[in-house]
Amino acid sequence: MIKKEECNYLDVARFIGIYLVILGHFPFNESNVFFEKLIYAFHMPLFFFISGYLHKDTMFSLPILKKILYSLIVPYIIYNVVFIVPHFIRYDFSIIVEDLKNICLVRFPANIPTWFFVSLFWVKVFSMFCKSKQMYIIISLLCVVALYINNFFPYPETFGIKAAFAAFPFFVIGFLLKDKPFKLIKPKYSTFIFIIVLFLLIVFVNKYGYVNMYLGIFKSIVFYFAIGAIVSIAIVYLSNFLPLKNNIIKTVSRGTMLIVGTHWIIIVFFTHFTPNLNFVFSVVISLIITLLYYFPIYFTYRKFPILYGKTKSK
């Protein structure tokens, strides 16, 4: 059980983000693929932005590195092991060697969404070498350059590093804005900001189409970072005014590691038995799944902290 603390705007923003992750992993047909493009334009930038917003500046040390390994790599291993048995049974154990290789390389692991844990690990490692805000910015620019060069000399995603290059600038933006009082901005501007940001997002998707942080698919790296940052900041700001601050939202938002690590099993189940889902059903069922995660998170958060990358409950 999570301690009874006030649900805040970051909880609301994380809840929105994890809901969009689940929805984005449902299959979209040709008539609804535009909505998929909208989601993928910002949902992962939002998570890394929030991670940076919550980040505590630390310098490199072996104890800190060990802590980060435990909090992110151990869950990556656990959730892939949990998923791998039903995955192999589904495919008649015919691809064991290839899947084990992909898990080790973090290259389309059996439990695909868990790439997030490994890439966040690298992002945290990068941050440990940043001794100043200027260094955060410099390393962010180097990550952007690395992604740009990869367009000319592409290499397959390995160990989640390429995705970490794409994620680090959003993490840094969140970190640099962590002291900014989003919740103090006047609510009268919220509708105007929502309309403007939605307009920019639609324009971006219309012009540049599908993007994918993990796969490194960016038709315009610069505009991808711009729209991802703008939408992430807007969601955190708008979360102050959404009437969603309650214990269910708080619990679900603080158990996102469990959701990221297990929801792929649910997605595979639904797509296997109901392959022709319409968009409205996907929207509704994704919300139901997200809300129902309240119960497993509530009962496991303190008893099994390792599932959340923790050595003990907080």
Image: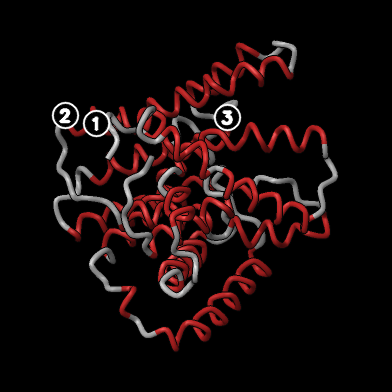
- Report which residue position mark 3 lands on: 111
Residue ID at (70%, 50%): 285
Asked if the residue at tag 2 contacts the one at tag 1, i.e. Cβ–Cβ closer than 8 Å, the answer is yes
Marks 1 and 3 sit apart, C-alpha to C-alpha, by: 23 Å
> Is disc 1 surrounded by few (<14), some (14 to 19) or many (20+) residues within 10 Å?
some
Query: Which quarter of the rendering shows the C terminus?
Result: top left
User: Front-most of 140 and 148?
Assistant: 140
In the picture, residue 308 is in which quadrant? top left
- Disc 2 marks a residue whose amino acid type is Pro
**Residue that appears at 70% across and 56% down:** 283
Q: Earlier in the sequence, mark 1 or mark 3?
A: 1
At 54% from the left edge and 81% from the top edge, which residue is drawn?
A: 196
Q: Looking at the picture, how far across and down is residue 272, in whole percent?
A: 79, 32
| Disc 3 to disc 2: CB gap under 8 Å | no
The residue at which mark 2 appears reads as 63
Pinpoint residue 144: horizontal percent, then vertical percent: 40, 54
